Amino acid sequence: MTLFEVGRICVKTMGREAGSYCVIVDEQDDRRVEITGPKGLNGVRRRPCSVKHLEPLGTILDIKKGASDEDVEKALDAADLLDKFRVKIRASE
């Protein structure tokens, strides 16, 4: 089991989506994973991402590898996290 496993909720730390929550939907190798926001929820589109650009959180959703954005959104709703995903995190300056 790795820190960056399918279903793990993370925060993007780099790029224009920095501060946004995302969910890992697939593991590509030990350095890259596929993430989604989903885009309709918070603007984070489904795409590959370096694990160096993610901060993993303690929550893991019960989703299957390669889950669709609709399945991810249903899992977020079941975990009562939809409102949390709509807001970006701002690092203290």
Image (cartoon, grey):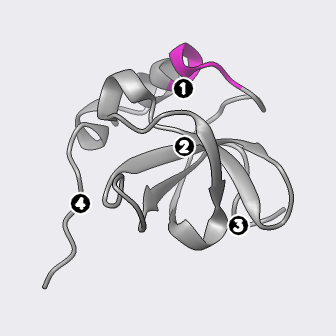
Marks 4 and 1 close (CB-CB < 8 Å): no
Which residue corresponds to the image point at 64% horizontal and 34% vertical from the top-left?
A: 62
Q: Secondary structure at mark 1?
A: helix
Distance of label 2 from label 3 (alpha carbons): 13 Å
Q: Quadrant of residue 80?
A: top left
If you read the primary sequence from the N terminus, does the residue marked by circle 1 or circle 2 appear first? 2
Q: Which residue is mark 3?
A: 3
Residues 15 and 33: in front is: 15
Marks 1 and 2 close (CB-CB < 8 Å): yes
Categorize mark 4 by other alpha carbons within 10 Å: few (<14), some (14-19), many (20+): some
Spot occupied by residue 33 in the image (x, y as percentages of width and height) = 71, 52
Which residue corresponds to the image point at 44% horizontal and 24% vertical from the top-left?
A: 78
Distance of label 3 from label 1 (alpha carbons): 19 Å
Q: Which residue is mark 1?
A: 72
Q: Which residue is mark 2?
A: 23
Q: Amino acid at mark 1?
A: Val
If you read the primary sequence from the N terminus, does the residue marked by circle 3 or circle 1 appear first? 3
Residue 89, numbered label = 4
Residues 38 and 80: in front is: 38
Q: Amino acid at mark 4?
A: Ile
Distance of label 4 from label 3 (alpha carbons): 21 Å
